[in-house]
Amino acid sequence: YNQVMLNGTSASSSVYTSNAFLVADMDQLSVSITTSAAAASRTTLQGSNETGSINTWSLITGINNATGAIPGLYSVTPGFRFMRATRSSLDSQLIVQFQGKSVR
């Protein structure tokens, strides 16, 4: 399964938070982050185990571009029901894409 979570490649994009993606059946997860601007930014991955309306999110990881970590490919430990991504600012023009595989 391959899905773009967050597409903020345009400086005029006002999307800072992706939709929630159901990843409960995934045994393997990875996230790819690419950027078109070298601005300092932070990408955050969040997970939730709630059902229905999701009001509570937990931090999975935060990736800082200031340390040179973006772009990159990251392995994510599965175990939560939903996952989403956020970007910190308008100048963080990036794409967050996740890949998942169920081996069941």
Image (cartoon, rainbow, N blue to C red):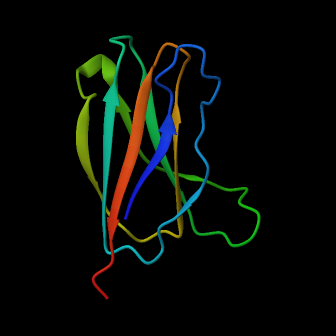
What residue is shown at x 48% (from left), y 74% (from top)? 24
**Percent x, y for residue 10?**
51, 19
Q: Is residue 102 above or below residue 82?
A: below
Indicate the quadrant where residue 55 lies. Answer: bottom right
Indicate the quadrant where residue 70 lies. Answer: top left
Q: Is residue 39 above or below residue 22?
A: above
Total marks placed: 0
**Percent x, y for residue 88?**
52, 25
Q: Quadrant of the N terminus?
A: bottom left
What residue is shown at x 38% (from left), y 11% (from top)? 39
What residue is shown at x 47% (from left), y 68% (from top)? 23
Q: Is residue 20 above or below residue 26?
A: above
**Percent x, y for residue 31?**
33, 49
**Percent x, y for residue 89?**
54, 19
In this rendering, would 55 be left or right of 23? right
Q: Quadrant of the C terminus?
A: bottom left
Residue lying farthest right? 53
What residue is shown at x 56% (from left), y 16% (from top)? 90
